[in-house]
Amino acid sequence: MKPSSTEVGTALYGAWRLMRFDSNAVSYFDKSVDGFWKSFYAAVFWVPVMTIVSFIFAPQLPVNLLSILSMLMSNIAYLFVFPLIFMGVCNVIGWEKNFIGCIVALNWTRVFYACLLLPVGLIFSTIIANAGDPSSVGLATPGEAANQPSGLLLLVFLGLALYALAYEIFIYSRSLEISLPAGFGAVVIEMMIALVWTLAQSIIMAVTGGMSGTGG
């Protein structure tokens, strides 16, 4: 069920306005059952980016054809697994009324969210790479850190990370029509689900990486 170019453009425009914390942005999403299934088309845009981000945040994972395919399949699977789990959560908490609209908003905003996480991941990897440097942020005063490249990177990283958190809270708050504190709770729930999924993903990646290494 592929959306038209007009529907994609409208949904992405709504996602862009959500990034700017526009309270009326959710009105650009098709919150019908048909719109729900069409929103999964957004994965075409963000799954490849999130696959790259996944390897950036987990440099210990092997990088080969098998592991890349495994990561791609894992991210695609999560796209469908998360709504199933979150639907159960919404039914228990009482958020089921706006569940479809929430998933639609999440699917389309993940396009920009993935693009946001890419520079965050690159900065994170740079900070980790510089961690052994005596002039790194961890061994400098706050004033000195602000004048060092690694210090500036840390400030940018924290700024982007906080923005990403606020962005997620706002999405849940507006799409589920709940308060901002409740939106924060929804983000925590998503993070817990994602953590369990990531742990399972890491185990699978380690196994497939080992199999690839053995085969080579």
Image (tube, grey):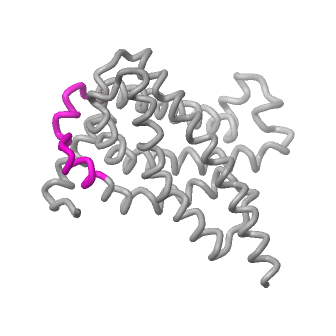
Q: Is residue 125 left or right of residue 112?
A: right
Q: The N terminus is located in which quarter?
A: bottom left
Q: Residue at x 36, y 63 (%)?
A: 44
Q: Is residue 33 magenta?
A: yes
Measuring from the top left, give residue 188's x and y in whole percent.
54, 27
Q: Nearer the viewer, residue 65 or 141?
A: 65
Outermost residue on the left side: it is: 6
Q: Residue at x 58, y 37 (%)?
A: 157
Measuring from the top left, give residue 113's x and y in whole percent.
42, 44
User: Count of labels shown?
Assistant: 0
Q: The C terminus is located in which quarter?
A: bottom right
Measuring from the top left, give residue 100's x and y in whole percent.
28, 38
Quadrant of residue 167 in the image? top left
Q: Residue at x 46, y 31 (%)?
A: 163
Q: Is residue 7 magenta?
A: no
Q: Residue at x 78, y 38 (%)?
A: 136
Q: Is residue 62 above or below residue 195?
A: below
Q: Is residue 106 above or below residue 59?
A: above
Quadrant of residue 120 in the image? top right
Q: Is residue 58 left or right of residue 12?
A: right
Q: Nearer the viewer, residue 93 or 64?
A: 93
The span picked out in magenta is: 21-39
Q: Is residue 210 above or below residue 111?
A: below
Q: Is residue 95 left or right of residue 2?
A: right
Q: Is residue 2 above or below residue 182?
A: below
